[in-house]
Image (cartoon, helix red, strand yellow):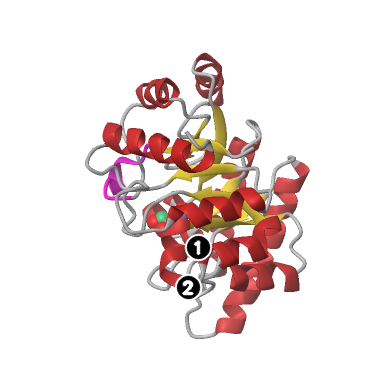
Amino acid sequence: MIRSCVTIALVKEIKTGPWIFWEDLEQSMAKASAMGFDAIELFTSSAAAVDPNVLKPLLEKYKLKLAAVGTGAGKVLHGLTLTDPSEAVRKQAISFISDMIAFGAAFGAPAIIGSMQGQQGQDRQQALAWLAEGLRMLSHQADEKGVALIYEPLNRYETTLFNTLEAGVNFIESEDLRNVKLLADLFHMNIEESDMPASIRAHANQIGHVHFADSNRRPMGNGHAEMGPIAIALQESGYSGYVSAEAFPWPDSDAAALQTIRAFRQYFQNS
Ligand code: LER
Ligand code: MN
């Protein structure tokens, strides 16, 4: 079964990002729950930003799951990536993500590596070796805690490493990274893929999470993505994870969340 999810960002420094809710954690969870979302995805400044002893009762109270945790604050706030030329920075990046893995895993949620992958720089082979090394170490840690590690191909304006599902799958398979699953972010895919439903069908068994946004990164229904065939491809290929709204809070958070759950029901629950 495909389940609905909405993002909550709690990093005040980067309020221009593609996340639906931004304010108070409990208030956002109460709204998500009232609208009928199954889960939340959290984007926090660090693994210590939200106390698990606070989050656990809130998840119970609002009957929500934690679907995933984003690690991008490590890059945005601290400039950390897995492919930085400095070994010290790469180590800090691994440590930051490792703490996020532990935080999420306590709730059965995987961590997402998006912007923390960095860029290829001068030497692509070297960057890929560092990326593989980081993903190997972190995916082992995730495995020990019973969760996958989610790697996200991003569009060409955000990374020079891997931009399509196919490129991501080829990399994790060639490196034998068995506990790494891919994130199919429909916004990035809309820029990079030549045929989104075909790409989803071809790589469905490697997809661990989906980011749900329209072509312009507004909530689904506000752009020109052809969501019907994409939803059918996800359903027919047996995808059974979350479809998580990582989209701009347009025109505002509440309207964006409502539009998202409406679109989710239309495409995934046929109602
Ligand atoms: C992270 O999930 C992502 O998609 C990046 O584009 C965030 O800016
Ligand atoms: Mn994304």
Query: Where is the N terminus found, in terms of image quarters?
Result: top right
The residue that label 1 is drawn on is 81
Q: Position of residue 107 (x, y in %)?
A: 63, 31
On the question of residue 164 being in view, the answer is yes
Q: Position of residue 20 (x, y in %)?
A: 35, 40
Name the amino acid, label 2.
Answer: Gln
Q: What whole-number distance in Å separates the C-alpha atoms at marks 1 and 2?
A: 8 Å
Residue 105, x across and y down, in percent: 65, 37
- From what the image shows, is residue 124 above or below residue 135? below
Q: SS for tag 2?
A: loop
Q: Quadrant of residue 162?
A: bottom right
Q: Which residues are magenta?
A: 8-17
Vertically, is 30 above or below 261? above
Is 20 colored magenta in this rendering? no
Compared with 122, 193 (above or below) is above
Residue 153 vs residue 148: left or right? left
